[in-house]
Image (cartoon, coloured by chain):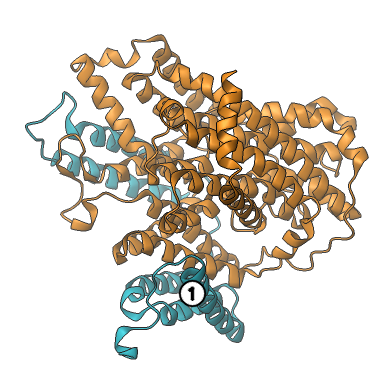
Chain colours: A orange, B cyan
Amino acid sequence: MEIIDNLALGFSIALSPYTLILAVVGCFLGTIIGALPGLGPSNGVAILIPITFTLGLDATSALVLMTSVYYGAMYGGRISSILLNIPGDEPALMTTLDGYPMAKAGRSGDALVLSGVASFVGALLATVGLMLLAPMLARVAYLFGPAEYFALYLLAFCTLGGMASNNQAKAALASCIGLGIAMVGIDSASGMPRLTGGNLHLYDGIDFLVAIVGLFAIAEVFFFIESHGKNSSIGVKLGKVTIPWKDIFDTKWTMLRASGVGFIAGILPGAGASLGSFMAYMSEKAIAGEKGGFGTGVAKGIAAPEAGNNAAAGGALVPMLTLGVPGSGTTAVLLALLMTLNITPGPTLFTDRPEVVWGLIASLLIANFVLLLMNVPMVKIFVRVLMVPPWVLLPGVTMVSFVGIYSLSGSYFDLLLMVGFGVLGYVLRKLDIPTVPVILGILLGGNMEDALRRAMVISDGEWTYLYSSPIAIGLWIAAIVGFVAPMFLRSVLRKPQRITD
Amino acid sequence: MASDRIFGLVATLLAFAFIAGATQVQTSFLSDPVGPKFFPILIGIVGAISGMFMVLRPDPEPDWPVLRTFGALSVAVIVLVAYAFALKPLGFLLPTTLAAGLLSYQISPRPRMAALAGIGLSVGLFIVFKFALGLGLVVFPKGLIG
């Protein structure tokens, strides 16, 4: 049994006291980050990367810490959705639909516990799925040559643009901004500087961490200045928390189905957790029918999106680890972490550095149990966190971002670039241009160009080589469908609006 | 409407500039069939097409903030730029107190609270960074403490 050996290896790493402490700290920080309105998994993980980097953690420890933060943030997102009707992060939007009405009906404790259990089921099943599926996919990934990788990168941009945005042209433009930024600097193949405008600071290229922190964290500060922190928490009340056994028992099939749906949505490149929770909620709503009372605060309406979103978070790790193609904004940030740690995701990761992969999977399993324990009995502590006023939180986030980026390079130029990316992020989000393709472009641009150029070297400049294998043809078709199909499905797949009082 | 058109136009022009810049990239003798120019030019073309689409088929206008909020945003940007320049020569505590306080004031205009937030954040974060995380930060400018 290969998988048991691998897991034993993983647990031997994850159960060391030091790694265990990192996992617990990561879960705690992650839940807080997820719960705070204005700090989601993407920007939370983004501002922590430079800090972990300067701490000098080794690859496995850093990865364990950050993925615990990632899972924790997925759990934490539900707290502000349920209590305040403000999704702490985008995937938690669907949880507001039934969570907030249930809290208004005086059952906020039940809603929090139920959603915590649903998160646990979703995340646990997804981690098991990751364990089974990732090694298989890694074996398939050995068949990928440069032509297939080029098509795969294209697929990621197309589906991300197709699904995550309301306007294809804007998503394509965002991808081009990211890819264009990735081109700046020394060309690795010919050693010639490109598009630097003669600025010596740009010869090294633009560090993706600078762009990520700017686009996610600094842009958020501008949004809070615009709203004057009005979307903040006042008067959060939570009574005695008991465990609603009946609701948990009643929703067991819902949780299982939603986990399956979410996991599959998470695996699709570019779809991610938002789509996972959306699909899970909509499919359960369809199964329950009119009598289900979805949207009025029913238990199934809370269990489905939470199980779906956490399962998708696990599913999104599958393409990220095996192919190096992230499935969502947060996994794009995790990919940035891997690249910072000099780990190249892909099939070779599973054979060359099994301790990283299996240590990570084992700590995800542990993190899940830690999170369940933290989120059910200790939920009151995290509710307190919601009281942190935005006029302290956001300046704090800014200062942490500055120190983190500054500690990477010690150059004021990176800080200026970060502020510039913050302004860009604000304008892009105002115009409804998605920022995740920008990040993905910066991260993958170099690899995508390399894949194209290596493919052309192999075929000696013969373009048909790009779609000469069945895998490549399949990926090209999927990419085109993923980009075009949402144009026609838009009326069907319209996202439900947040309920307002 | 107008915002999308303007942004699309700017993006298109930038894409053309990007293409023009890419054609100037020097090729070395170590060249492959594609070379270092092709991919950037391709990106520029796709970007220009997307930009033109935004000009031709704009989405409804977003709610831009009122002029005063733009003022607050510009102040925030200036504070951040100044902070970027000040962090190295002036040490951590002074610029952080000022920058955090000013940002806090922009979010919620209550001077006393903002000042408290500034001082609390700079001291609190300094303790966390210096002692819990062990980052080497300069406390005060060198000239001040000799």
Q: Is residue A402 visible?
A: yes
* Horizontal side, residue A214 vs residue A92: left or right: left
Whether residue B44 is situated above or below residue B79 in the rendered picture: above
- Report x, y in % for residue A26: 60, 52
| Position of the C terminus of chain A by quadrant | bottom right
Q: Secondary structure at mark 1?
A: helix
Residue visible at 27% across and 32% down in the picture: B42
Label 1 is placed on what type of residue? Answer: Phe
**Which chain hosts label 1?**
B
- In front here: B75 or A277? A277
Name the image quarter holding residue A464. top left
Residue lying at the far left of the rendered structure: B29
Whether residue B92 is situated above or below residue A77 in the rendered picture: below
Name the image quarter holding residue A288. top right
Residue visible at 60% across and 41% down in the picture: A363
Q: Is residue A432 visible?
A: no
* Horizontal side, residue A402 vs residue A309: left or right: left
- In front here: A5 or B63? A5
- Report x, y in % for residue B25: 14, 41
- Report x, y in % for residue A390: 62, 68
Mark 1: few, some, or many residues within 10 Å (few <14, many ≥20)?
Answer: many
Whether residue B105 is situated above or below residue A424 in the rendered picture: below
| Position of the N terminus of chain A by quadrant | top right
Residue lying at the far right of the rendered structure: A246
Q: Which residue is mark 1?
A: B126
- In front here: B128 or A185? B128
How many marks the image carries: the answer is 1
- Report x, y in % for residue A469: 37, 10
* Horizontal side, residue A345 vs residue B107: left or right: left
Whether residue A204 is situated above or below residue B54 in the rendered picture: below
Residue visible at 73% across and 53% down in the picture: A79
